[in-house]
Image (cartoon, coloured by chain):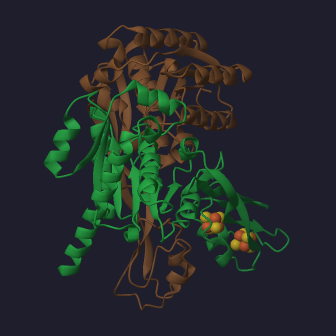
Amino acid sequence: MSVDPNGQLTIAIAAGKGGTGKTLVATSLAIAIDAHYPGCAQIIDCDVEEPNAHLLMQPELTAQAPVEVLVPEVDLDTCTRCGACARACQFSAIAVIRQAVLTFHGLCAGCGACAYVCPVDAITEVTRRVGTVKSGSAGEIDFVTGTLNVGDQRATPVTKAVKDRIRDDLITILDAPPGTACPMQETVEGSDYCILVTEPTPFGLSNLQDAVETCRRIGVPCGVIINRDGSGNDGVERYCAQEGIEVLLRVPQDRRIAEAYSRGETLVATMPQWRDELATVYYHITDMVAAQATGEGVS
Amino acid sequence: MNASFRQLTVVSGKGGTGKTTCLGSFAAIAHDKVLADCDVDAANLYQLLNPTVIDSGDFMGAQIAVRDEQACKRHGECERVCRFDAITVDAVDELACEGCGFCTIVCPEKALHMEQVACGTWYQAKTDYGPLAYARLLPGAESSGRLVTMVRQKAEDIALLQGKQLILIDGAPGIGCVATAAIADVDMALVVTEPSLSGIHDMERVADLIRHFGVPMTVIVNKADINADNTRRIRQYCAQRGVEVLAELPYDESVTAAMAHGVPLVEYQDGPVAQGIRKAWSSIEQMLGV
Ligand code: SF4
Ligand code: SF4
């Protein structure tokens, strides 16, 4: 192969819906890259609502850091109950009701507008923990995972915190949250390439179409891996052909894969032949990204 | 809790465990209900039910900052206060904008204002299985708990108007705002899980969320026979918490075939999976008193 890993690509693995095999592909791809370029792979689990990659990778997590956001704290002795803070807040996260000032931290975006507008400086911003980032390694693979606290609804700060750990000197695989909403977009944005994992059913197709449109909108090139190939119909294949989206790999419907996954085994651990298949997918992506970069350079 | 109708949300924590298969079948079995597809980010239930739309409307999403480029004098105050790196003197990054409006407050030229953007459409529809409320997000749009709440509201309107006794809600995966909005204030949350390590892990997280809202929980274990040990672990977990396991469904590849044909499983076959779902449904009917 002519391409060396100095491209340091960031590849996001996403899916229009959960349960299509996204984490199975992400973990196995990281292992395949590591097998070909030992010590050059990193995997980051960006599905902070339901992180799963650690279950398959069994990493040794050696460091842990809190993810904190700023929330307002009101000094009621200084506060004149003027209501300026409540008018400034777009999220109804702070309210002045008769003699009390109520703050709703679950709704707060941590923007700081309330503290800025308060005429008597009664508001201080204090940190509140919304999640955790843990890091370590699985063999030689650099491993990062984030967890949103149960009961907290805003995943964005945790997603950002894990993405801050992307290392430029490593080939990074991002395991994206399912769907095409904000958490998925925040993950995929800025990646060099996005692999969309889907299954060959009408649902898989419709979720895939949404995901493709999302990738196009945020300007990340994408290709498809069909999981449980042979189990449904050919709608996904026809759509990809029509749209000129490359099918990078087909993983067959196989009870053995489902059983191995249930035990927390990766695809390549169960069926080592997939290691080379996935490495080929990686090389191919490297070529495509490089070709695109040169193409853009010329034009 | 509501006197005139009961609400059941089906969730999975992790996607792909068979939530829509169960729900589609419940839709075919249950009487006198309204369906609400609240998995707005990957709405699949409505596709299975072949809806005819009777009413629809725009869903206005979050606000974003919009700048009057003529009025802007490039002071850069906006850029300095924005904590989301969403604005520079050159451009607004719509994806990054959280809609807090801080920039509009500090701009000395009043060149910025907030605008709501349409980010999806809600629908009321009829299907062969009863009335349905659902929503579609524009691709790339930001999903939100508010959209879920809106779909539930539309379903409740129908239930009240037509005197239905049950609302069947397809919930969203995860534990964030969309998942939360589908669980709040329902009469029962049914978790469809599978005996994989991730299935268990995600079930435990969504169970915490359900408990957080004080909602009674039940469980269906799908593909129960792919890992007997893990299925036992799920049973133990549930037994310890007084959660009833309504059914254990076997691994069956024809389930995907039913999906590919676009029909609810119970109408496609009557194998062990379909029978398990029927059994689960009669337990649910008893528990909810419908
Ligand atoms: S920091 Fe922003 S979101 Fe939070 S209460 Fe203040 S104004 Fe509202
Ligand atoms: S703006 Fe300041 S003084 Fe006015 S109500 Fe809010 S905290 Fe109190």
Residue B91 lies in what quarter of the image? bottom left
Residue located at (58% from left, 9% from top): B286
State the hue of chain B. Answer: brown
Residue B85 left/right relative to B94: right
Quarter of the picture containing the C terminus of chain A is: bottom left
Residue farthest to the left, as pictured: A242
Residue B66 falls in image quadrant: bottom left
Residue B167 vertical placement versus B77 (above, below): above
Measured as percent of width and height from the top left, residue B167 is found at 48, 25
Q: Can residue B5 be seen in this view?
A: no
- Can residue A136 be seen at all in this image of the molecule? yes
Number of marks in the rendered image: 0
Q: In this view, does A153 lie above or below A218?
A: above
- What shade does chain A have? green
Seen at 69% across and 32% down, the residue is: B214
Rendered location of residue B120, percent (x, y): 35, 49
The foreground one among A53 and B154 is A53
Query: Which of B79/B6 is in front?
Result: B79
Image quarter hosting the N terminus of chain A: bottom left
Residue B24, given in percent of the width and then of the height, sits at: 38, 22
The residue sitting at 53% across, 15% down in the picture is: B248
Which is nearer the eye, B185 or B226?
Answer: B226
Q: Where ligand 2 lies, by image quadrant?
A: bottom right
**For residue B59, side relative to residue B217 (left or right):** left
Q: Image height check: is B284 above or below B147?
A: above
Decide: is B40 above or below B29.
Answer: below
Across and down, in percent, residue B266 comes to: 36, 13
